[in-house]
Image: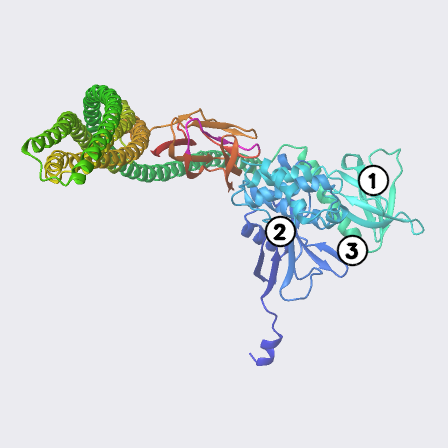
């Protein structure tokens, strides 16, 4: 065969492209294939057995046509493109989709086609029905609604509503999605085929469902009309209204349908009714109308007959398939439910495990803290116990010192009594000395008077003697007589002896009196000196004892300050001893005054006596003019008797004066020391009282500490807890003693939203704890706080009205506190 012959030979196959509602397929067809061959190939490929509803549609110029099954494909007016494009669509629609559509693939293809017609606004649908149909479409596509998976915005890429509906209302895409999701959430548990069937059941009630519209005219001059062909019959519509027909011809009322070129005739079954004629624009349209009328009428008549064996088998198989799928869905639902329950149980166990781990961790931390607190409390208790023992020991020592001071005070009191007795004796002695000094003064006055009288008598005697002497001496001189005879000398001597005897007798008497007075004074002065020395010794001993007592007070105060940090206690008897020492000093001062007065009296007496001695000397001087030898003998005797007396008396007076001055100075010093000692004793007494109160306080604290050691952790009083949402609740704890407390609370939530509590101390908010929960799973958070509380302070939790917590018998939400240390 030549090359030219090969080129002219027709190919035996041609390419065909078939577009279904959810797929595109290409086939290689033989040239001799008829339309039925291609349709059967597509049906087998799709798995469709209910083929009487579908057909292959293609586009011819400005209209469309259906591929005729009895004619060859290439002999029809198909496009000459390669590949040739056909649309596999539903050509006829059932009256009741639930009864007529058997196969699931048939339902799915119808669902997709009707959905597209609604979205393309080929079928009018109200906004409410559009939202409901969109919810079933979402259920068929996505399955059951899951808020964890289907987040807001998951429908943004899907076309679910007609544009007319979207433009009719001023609503955003999120608002439409919210409405669709609200319906979608109610379809839980509906399978895909069931959702599609529900979609078709709603769509079949729409006025434009399954209607094919064609432009016609009743005659060449009338206004344009619309002819609608559907499963019920033929309908005549106005051009502006495709919902309500002006005239209808049901299939049961039509006797014959025919056309002649562009004229189309409908003959009613009732012969009384007029024949309806109309005209189309093209002959091809009349053929298409006739073809649709024949197909819909055949299906109309077929529905009213008994199903064929093939249809019955298909329905039986479909029923069995539905039952099997239903069983599978039930099993799958049970398994899914069991799986969900298992997952929930697993999540619960994991949550419980995490909770137990957290609780174990918190318990371990609390145990460690408790152990540390117990060790700290034990150490504090040991220290407090040692301090208590030391304080008890110091208290015992203080008690012993107090007893010792009481004994010392008693001794001081006895010594005071003895001293008072000696003072009284000294006072009596001083009174006696004063009386004696007064008596001696009186005697000295009498002696002075006697001496004055004696002096007067002596002066008179001297005068007379001088007169006698003057009368005798001139006679002797005048006569110049020789020395006197012995008789005359004897007379003169006798007279002189008489005068000397007179003077000697007086002097002896006076000397004896003075000597006697001096001896008595010396004895009394010696006795007084002994008493003063004894008094001085006693004062020295008292001073030494008070110094020892003061040293004991200082040492006791230092010991108390070292161990108690407070002064020690001195008994009341020591203060009395201080007061008694002051009275003793006053008595000493008075006694010294009396002694001074006695000494002054004695001094006056001695001065008087010294004056008498001077008079005697003058008498001796007068006698010295006449006779020198006797006068010298007498004066020498008088000096021997007076010289040892006068210096001794003045020395004793000076010694007494010095002793009195020393006693006064010492008394002043003792008074000042006594005042200082009294002040220190008062301060020490106050310090000892404070120390005693401190010891009592430490003993009470030691008792409290021992009580606390018996329970290292004290749980506080906590009221019952409850679970609530949307109302306020509270939990209360009360601090039994003053101290530092560790307070902890755990909040559990199982609702979406806010979970948290307020913390109040004595009805004053001190803390706010909140967390956001996005799912319905259990969620926990734990908070703790350390507060210093006093006895009676209250801590409670308040649940805000917009928050929620969860609790049950397992105590998911807890609130507790414990005492760390006082």
588 on left or right of 301 = left
Residue 782 location in percent, x, y?
A: 42, 39
Q: Residues within 10 Å of mark 1 (few under 14, many from 20)?
A: some
Q: Where is mark 1, residue-wise?
A: 245
Q: Where is mark 2, residue-wise?
A: 156
From the viewer's perspective, is the residue at label 3 or at label 1 nearer?
1
128 vs 437: above or below = below
747 on left or right of 668 = right
Residue 443 colored magenta?
no
Which quadrant of the view contains residue 100? top right
Q: Where is mark 3, residue-wise?
A: 284
Give how far apart the Cα atoms at labels 2 and 3 are.
43 Å
308 vs 116: above or below = above
- Start-end of magenta stretch: 789-801
Residue 420 location in percent, x, y?
A: 23, 20
| Residue at image point 55% right, 50% down | 44
* 629 or 683, nearer to the observer: 629
| Camera sees residue 61 | yes
Residue 647 location in percent, x, y?
A: 16, 37
Give how far apart the Cα atoms at labels 3 and 1 are.
24 Å
Q: Residues within 10 Å of mark 2 (few under 14, many from 20)?
A: few
């Amino acid at each position: 065969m030549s090359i030219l012959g090969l080129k002219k030979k027709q190919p035996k196959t041609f390419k065909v492209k078939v577009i279904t509602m959810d797929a595109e397929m290409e086939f290689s067809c033989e040239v001799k294939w008829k339309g039925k061959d291609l349709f059967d190939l597509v049906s087998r490929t799709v798995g469709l057995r209910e083929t009487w509803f579908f057909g292959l549609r293609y586009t011819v110029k400005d209209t469309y046509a259906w591929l005729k099954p009895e004619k060859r494909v290439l002999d029809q007016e198909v496009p000459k493109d390669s590949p040739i494009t056909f649309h596999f669509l539903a050509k006829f629609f059932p009256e009741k989709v639930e009864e007529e559509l058997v196969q699931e693939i048939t339902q799915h293809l119808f669902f997709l086609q009707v959905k597209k017609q609604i979205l393309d606004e080929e079928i009018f649908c109200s906004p409410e029905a559009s939202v409901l149909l969109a919810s079933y479409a979402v259920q068929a596509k996505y399955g059951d609604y899951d808020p964890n998976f289907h987040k807001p915005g998951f429908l943004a890429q899907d076309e679910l509503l007609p544009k007319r509906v979207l433009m009719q209302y001023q609503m955003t895409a999120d608002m439409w999605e919210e409405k669709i999701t609200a319906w979608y959430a109610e379809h839980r548990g509906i399978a895909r085929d069931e959702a599609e069937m529900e979609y078709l059941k709603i769509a079949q009630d729409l006025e434009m469902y399954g209607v094919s519209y064609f432009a016609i005219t009743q005659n060449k001059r009338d206004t344009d009309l619309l002819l609608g062909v559907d499963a019920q019959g033929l309908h005549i519509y106005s051009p502006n209204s495709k919902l309500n027909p002006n005239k209808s011809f049901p299939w049961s009322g039509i006797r014959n349908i025919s056309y002649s070129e562009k004229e189309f005739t409908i003959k009613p079954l009732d012969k009384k009714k007029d024949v309806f004629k109309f005209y189309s624009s093209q002959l091809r349209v009349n053929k298409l109308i006739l073809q649709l009328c024949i197909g819909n009428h055949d299906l109309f008549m077929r529905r009213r007959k008994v199903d064929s064996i093939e249809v019955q088998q298909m329905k039986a198989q479909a029923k069995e398939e539905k039952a099997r799928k239903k069983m599978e869905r039930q099993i799958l639902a049970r398994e899914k439910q069991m799986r969900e329950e298992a997952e929930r149980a697993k999540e619960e166990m994991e949550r419980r495990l995490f909770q137990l781990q957290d609780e174990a961790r918190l318990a371990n931390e609390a145990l460690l803290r408790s152990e540390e607190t117990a060790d700290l409390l034990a150490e504090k208790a040991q220290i407090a116990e040692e301090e208590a023992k030391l304080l008890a020991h110091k208290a015992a020592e203080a008690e012993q010192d107090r007893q010792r001071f009481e004994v010392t005070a008693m001794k001081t009191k006895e010594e005071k009594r003895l001293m008072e007795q000696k003072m009284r004796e000294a006072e009596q002695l001083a009174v006696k000395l004063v009386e004696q000094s007064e008596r001696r003064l009186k005697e000295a006055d009498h002696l002075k008077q006697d001496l004055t009288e004696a002096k007067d008598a002596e002066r008179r005697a001297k005068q007379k003697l001088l007169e006698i002497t003057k009368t005798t001496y001139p006679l002797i001189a005048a006569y110049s007589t020789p020395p006197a005879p012995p008789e005359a000398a004897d007379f003169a001597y006798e007279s002189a002896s008489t005068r000397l005897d007179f003077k000697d007798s007086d002097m002896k008497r006076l000397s004896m009196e003075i000597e006697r007075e001096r001896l008595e004074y010396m004895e009394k002065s010696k006795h007084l000196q002994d008493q003063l020395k004894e008094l001085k010794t006693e004062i020295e001993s008292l001073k030494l004892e008070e110094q020892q007592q003061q040293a004991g007070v200082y040492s006791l105060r230092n010991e108390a300050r070292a161990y108690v940090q407070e002064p020690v206690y001195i008994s009341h008897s020591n203060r009395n001893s201080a007061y008694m020492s002051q009275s003793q000093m006053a008595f000493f001062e008075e006694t010294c005054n009396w002694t001074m007065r006695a000494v002054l009296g004695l001094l006056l007496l001695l001065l008087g006596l010294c004056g008498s001695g001077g008079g005697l000397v003058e008498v001796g001087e007068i006698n010295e003019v006449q006779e020198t030898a006797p006068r010298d003998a007498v004066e020498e005797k008088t000096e021997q008797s007076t010289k040892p007396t006068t210096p001794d008396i003045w020395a004793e007076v000076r010694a007494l004066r010095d002793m009195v001055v020393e006693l006064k100075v010492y008394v002043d010093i003792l008074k000042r020391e006594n005042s200082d000692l009294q002040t220190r004793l008062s301060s020490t007494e106050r310090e000892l009282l404070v120390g005693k109160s401190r010891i009592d306080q430490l003993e009470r604290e030691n008792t409290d500490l021992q009580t606390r050691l018996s329970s290292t952790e004290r749980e506080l009083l906590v009221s019952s807890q409850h679970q609530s949402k949307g109302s306020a609740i509270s939990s209360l704890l009360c601090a039994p003693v003053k101290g530092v407390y560790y307070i902890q609370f755990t909040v559990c939530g199982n609702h979406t939203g806010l979970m948290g509590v307020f913390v109040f101390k004595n009805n004053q908010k001190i803390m706010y704890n909140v967390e956001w929960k996005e799912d319905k799973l259990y969620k926990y958070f734990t908070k703790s706080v350390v507060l210093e509380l006093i006895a009676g302070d209250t801590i409670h939790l308040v649940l805000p009205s917009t928050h929620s917590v969860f609790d049950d018998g397992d105590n998911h939400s807890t609130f507790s506190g414990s005492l760390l240390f006082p």
